[in-house]
Amino acid sequence: MNKSRLEAFSDGVLAIVITIMVLELRVPEESSWGALRDVAPTFLTYLLSFVYVGIYWNNHHHMLQLASKVNGAVLWANLHLLFWLSLLPFTTSWMDETGFDPVPTALYGIDLLLAAVAYFVLQRTLINGQGSDGPLAQAVGRDWKGKLSPVLYLAGILASFWVPYVGVAAFVVAALIWLVPDRRVERFVAEHGTSGRG
Amino acid sequence: MNKSRLEAFSDGVLAIVITIMVLELRVPEESSWGALRDVAPTFLTYLLSFVYVGIYWNNHHHMLQLASKVNGAVLWANLHLLFWLSLLPFTTSWMDETGFDPVPTALYGIDLLLAAVAYFVLQRTLINGQGSDGPLAQAVGRDWKGKLSPVLYLAGILASFWVPYVGVAAFVVAALIWLVPDRRVERFVAEHGTSGRG
Amino acid sequence: MNKSRLEAFSDGVLAIVITIMVLELRVPEESSWGALRDVAPTFLTYLLSFVYVGIYWNNHHHMLQLASKVNGAVLWANLHLLFWLSLLPFTTSWMDETGFDPVPTALYGIDLLLAAVAYFVLQRTLINGQGSDGPLAQAVGRDWKGKLSPVLYLAGILASFWVPYVGVAAFVVAALIWLVPDRRVERFVAEHGTSGRG
Amino acid sequence: MNKSRLEAFSDGVLAIVITIMVLELRVPEESSWGALRDVAPTFLTYLLSFVYVGIYWNNHHHMLQLASKVNGAVLWANLHLLFWLSLLPFTTSWMDETGFDPVPTALYGIDLLLAAVAYFVLQRTLINGQGSDGPLAQAVGRDWKGKLSPVLYLAGILASFWVPYVGVAAFVVAALIWLVPDRRVERFVAEHGTSGRG
């Protein structure tokens, strides 16, 4: 089955998620820099979620490059990932509007964690269709980022109940780790081509 | 006529429908797990409608795989389907905000029923363009899911006037039936290729 | 220059326009059929605008089929069309919320008229790039629909100041004329192929 | 790496940004031309931002035509551009709702300036991947528009603190300069083909 519609639908959902979050940025009633400063926490929270959706889009983009065909299981694993990402505007808003209270901050991390799990499941589903010596399995390799970030999310969730800003810091660090571009797929493609096997 | 724009436009509409529903999830004012529990019914209703849009997207994806060409009648049959699906955010909200009252719950089912009818009409329109021995007609076959789900919607609509939760249960069961991936098209493609005829 | 991005961007804008209009459908507070009946005018207005966006998408789809290349002038003529269509949610809302008062109903017609003019300009711009014996010029032919509908919009605008419902009736009739599928392009493609010239 | 998904995702985000701004157009409560006149400043502000998104979409379209491959750095440079453009609905609203007060008008210009910088960075990143004798570097050439518009934005930002309408005038002039279609890429393609090198 063709993967182009899976990509197009995912692009559509992620483009909407990334854009509707900006609707949460309430226009200040006053016209001063001070009024703008009050929006700053919302702005930074928006930036963090924007970066996360960007990370998922980039990683999704890279991963699908090495996927040759998709089946029904892949379609649903992908929708599962999109579901948790579609909740980001909600979890972002709650965390922001309550001023980074413990429970909302933890929920933000839980959403990130569930999206990471869904991404892992999608990756596994794609690899299963190729075999463990397929191009995706080789490109993913040891996947230390994919293993480290859930740990950071979990640490952040727990820390949120203690000092929420420490929790947020963990989520920021996890984002920064992913911001360093993931060259595994690019390197693999450079060495083997998109359909190459070792 | 080329089918790629039909797919792209449908992907766009479905991506927006599936994503704007999350805007209905009102951010709680309190920061407790209890406040979150109050959102739970809305969350589950959102999940149900998300799954339904996902089902339609998956089925649409499979069906169009076996469609070779589209004409004006197909374009309108497709817009007809998108119309009923575009009303899902409205019917979902009304059912949810009234706490699953009889009329709104029945209306949710009526929307699902009309979408199912529209999907059937689209399928027929595509098959008519291929002839009854075309790949889509063969892949669809006896289509027991397509015949069972309208019966479930109808039963759910009627049950809504008696005990709305029984109606909702019928809609959940119909969704679960579709969640089991539909392998007819995949099997057909595996056996005959996308353009094969028996 | 490639036309696929022009199509994709237009598909995106039209998909959003057609979908955000449903956000105007206010969820009734009561749970009765009577409460739903109060939404009926909004629903029918939404249906009319949905059909209009559908008509434009269909015609745009057909027209671009016969366009071989696009240049900067085409990109802007296309954005000009999308601009007037993007105002439909606004003009639809105003007409609906004021209960079909004269000025808002006339403005709805003015928006339709300006979109029709923009469509005509886009068509001319595409034909200019092909020459008057190009496939699009031949397929468009005498274009009686394209000439009749602006007259109907104009009549509807004027009638709105007298009896607004007569104005709305004119807009409905113009939509119905377009709903009859436009077979000119399909016939042309069947006879000559997409790039054929007489 | 394939550039089609980068284009599709950008098309999606820009289509949403350009369309959700119209949601800011508040439907007047009265039904008179006078009520509509009160919406006129918002309408014109919407038009200005619509044109700016259109300009970016057009330029992005042209630039990507001459890009052969994209890597991780290009994906992030592109997301960086989309970020500043996604803030346009916010900065547009603030400027409009405060009646063109100094700080909000300056912020609108700052957003335009940051988007221009992001566009420049994206262009540089793409050129770096091709070498300074690549097709994009040659097509871009001296790029007087790209150099003049940041100066106009900066002048407009400063002028906003003095007479905001002068600031807005600078942003309008910068848009008009871009509205004149940029024929550099078209000319280059006509002379050399999309992959040609002098």
Image: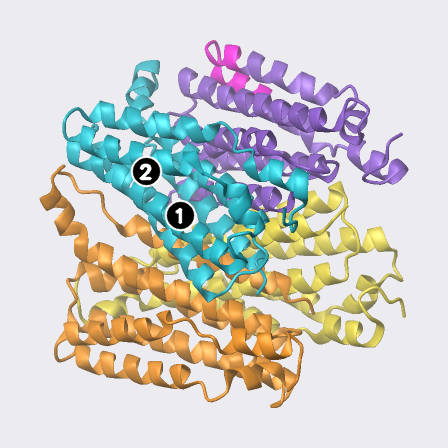
Chain colours: A cyan, B orange, C yellow, D purple
Q: Is residue B19 above or below residue A100?
A: below
**Residue at x 66%, y 74% (from the top left corner):** B68
Q: Residue at x 46, y 10 (%)?
A: D161
Instruction: Give amino acid for label 2.
Output: Pro
Task: Left or right? Give the position of B93 relative to B60.
Answer: left
The stretch of residues the image draws in magenta is D157-171
Quarter of the image for residue C110 reads bottom right
Of the residues shown, which amino acid type is indicated by label 1? Phe
Q: Residue A129, can we see it? A: yes
Q: Nearer the viewer, residue D105 or C161?
A: D105
Q: Which of D178 and D83 is in front in this view?
A: D83
Q: Distance between the residues labelled 2 and 1?
A: 10 Å
Query: What's the residue at 33%, 75% (across, down)?
Result: B177
Q: Quadrant of the N terminus of chain B?
A: bottom right
Residue D119 in the image: above or below residue B164: above
Q: Is residue B146 left or right of residue B135?
A: left
Q: How crowded is mark 2: few (under 14 residues within 10 Å), some or many (20 or more)?
A: many
Q: Quadrant of the C terminus of chain B?
A: bottom right
The local crowd at label 1, few if under 14, some if 14 to 19, many if 20 or more residues have their Cα within 10 Å, is: some
Residue B16: x percent and y percent?
A: 43, 54
Task: Chain letter for mark 1, please.
Answer: A
Left or right of A170 in this view: D77: right
**Quarter-wise, where is residue D97 in the image?**
top left
Residue positioned most to the left: B34
Q: Mark 2 lies on which chain?
A: A
> Which residue corresponds to mark 1?
A120
The residue pinned by badge 2 equals A150
- Say what secondary structure mark 1 lies in: helix
Residue D9 percent across, percent down from the top left: 55, 44
Q: Which of marks 2 and 1 is nearer the N terminus?
A: 1
* Relative depth, front residue between B32 and B10: B32
Residue D54 position, x and y percent, is: 61, 38
